[in-house]
Image (cartoon, grey):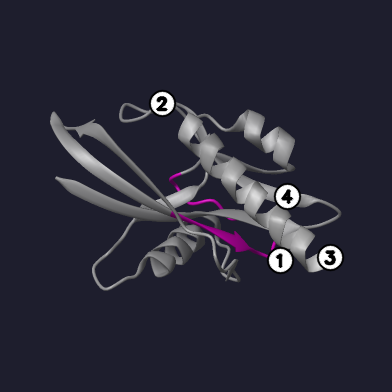
Amino acid sequence: MKEVSAGAVVFRQEKERMYLLLYKKAHEKYREQWSFSKGNVEKGEDEKETAAREIKEETGINDLKFVEGFKEKEKFFYKKEGETVYKEVVWFIAETKKEKVTLSFEHNDYEWLPYKKAVERLTFKNDKKLFEKAEKFLESRLTRWMS
C-alpha cells in the first residue's frame, strides 16, 4: 500500500521569522506531537494544492504564498491496521501574513515560534531535518537578495 501526503513549513515575517507548529495530544493511533501541517493528496490535486487545502482546513489560513524553489520529499514505511504502508510526504515552504489560527478538530493547540525554539519543540527527527533545510534555504535566499 502507498500513501502520498503534502504539507508545508508555514512562516510569517516579523522582526524575525515566526514558524507555525501544530500540536496533537496522544491518541490511540499516534503519540503526542508538535509538527507541521500536512495531509493526504486527494484525486485531482497536485501536491501544492493539497498542502494549501490541508493548511486551510487545519488552521484557517488561506493566504499562503509558496516560496519557489523548495521541494523536499520524505519517504518511510509505517504500520497501519497491521499492514505495511509506504509513505511519501512532499514538503514546501509557505508564507502567510495571518497570525490568527483557527484550529480544526485534528489539532489541540498551536504556536508561532522563532527558529531555535521551534526546532526544540518539534517531536520528530525527520521534521527537524526538514526544518533545518527550510531555514537554510530561506537564509540563503535572503543573503543572495541582500548582496
The residue indicated by pointer 3 is: 146
Mark-to-mark CA distance, 3 and 4: 20 Å
Report how many numbered discs are placed on residues in the image.
Answer: 4
- Judge from the rendering whether residue 137 lies leftward or rightward of residue 44; answer left or right: right
The x and y percentages for residue 125 are 49, 30
The residue indicated by pointer 1 is: 97
Whether residue 126 appears in this view of the structure is yes
Q: Quadrant of the C terminus?
A: bottom right
What residue range appears in magenta?
91-106
On screen, residue 137 above or below 66: above
- Judge from the rendering whether residue 40 lies leftward or rightward of residue 101; answer left or right: left
Q: Residue at x 73, y 49 (%)?
A: 18
Neighbour tally class for label 4: few under 14, some 14-19, many 20 plus, Cα within 10 Å: many
On screen, residue 87 above or below 26: below
Residue 138 forms part of the magenta stretch: no
User: Are dots 1 and 4 in contact, CB under 8 Å?
Assistant: no
Magenta region, main secondary structure: loop
Residue 100 forms part of the magenta stretch: yes
The residue indicated by pointer 4 is: 18
Q: Which mark is residue 31?
A: 2
